[in-house]
Amino acid sequence: MKNLKNLVVTLGITAALLMGNTVLAEGIGYIDTEKIYSGYDAIQNAMQEISKKELALQEYLLQQEKKSKELTTPIQKKNFEEKVAKEFKAKKEEYLKFKQDKEQAIYNRIQEASREVLVEQKLDAIVDSRVIFVGGIDVSDLVIAKLKKSAK
């Protein structure tokens, strides 16, 4: 019975020490995503790649529209439109997948850098600056520095 009491007291002290460690956290940090997007070149490059793909898709439609005007019979136009619709759908799906992959890669990099800053700064959480009304610690520059360091 005495050993059981000692065990309970030991577990209680251990639990108190473990919970006490969370009290040492510094609070909540926040990041300004606009600042991060403009301060990290890899994000700018990815956004330019996405824009180029989107422009290529629009250019494709313009070219096909010009070709469509050259056709004379309704059957030719109908067949051409069906062919273009099928090709456009495939190109659009390819573009959307490319865009989603790039955006997900950017998000993952920001999240990874934010996690590192969270641990280093002993913060409870890092949130987007748009959800902070008052208080918090701006860690945007620290996250940008991590992103730049990981790119090297």
Image: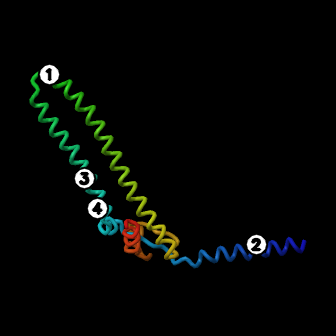
Image mark for residue 11:
2
Image mark for residue 51:
3
Label 3–label 4 contact, CB within 8 A: no
Q: Percent x, y for residue 79?
A: 20, 24
For label 1, the residue is: 74
Image mark for residue 111:
none
Q: Nearer the viewer, mark 4 or mark 2?
A: 4
Q: Which image quarter: residue 68?
A: top left
Label 4–label 2 contact, CB within 8 A: no
As measured in the structure, the alpha-carbon distance from the residue carrying label 1 to the one carrying label 4 is: 45 Å
**Comes first in the chain, label 1 or label 2:** 2
Q: Residue furthest front?
A: 152
Q: Residue furthest right?
A: 1
The amino acid beneath tag 1 is Pro
**Comes first in the chain, label 3 or label 4:** 4
Q: Is residue 23 above or below residue 94?
A: below
**Comes first in the chain, label 4 or label 2:** 2
For label 4, the residue is: 44
The amino acid beneath tag 2 is Leu
Q: Tag 4: Cα neighbours inside 10 Å, few (<14), some, or many (≥20)?
A: few
The amino acid beneath tag 3 is Ser
Foreground of the two, 123 or 67:
67
Q: Is residue 36 above or below residue 99?
A: below
As measured in the structure, the alpha-carbon distance from the residue carrying label 1 to the one carrying label 2 is: 84 Å
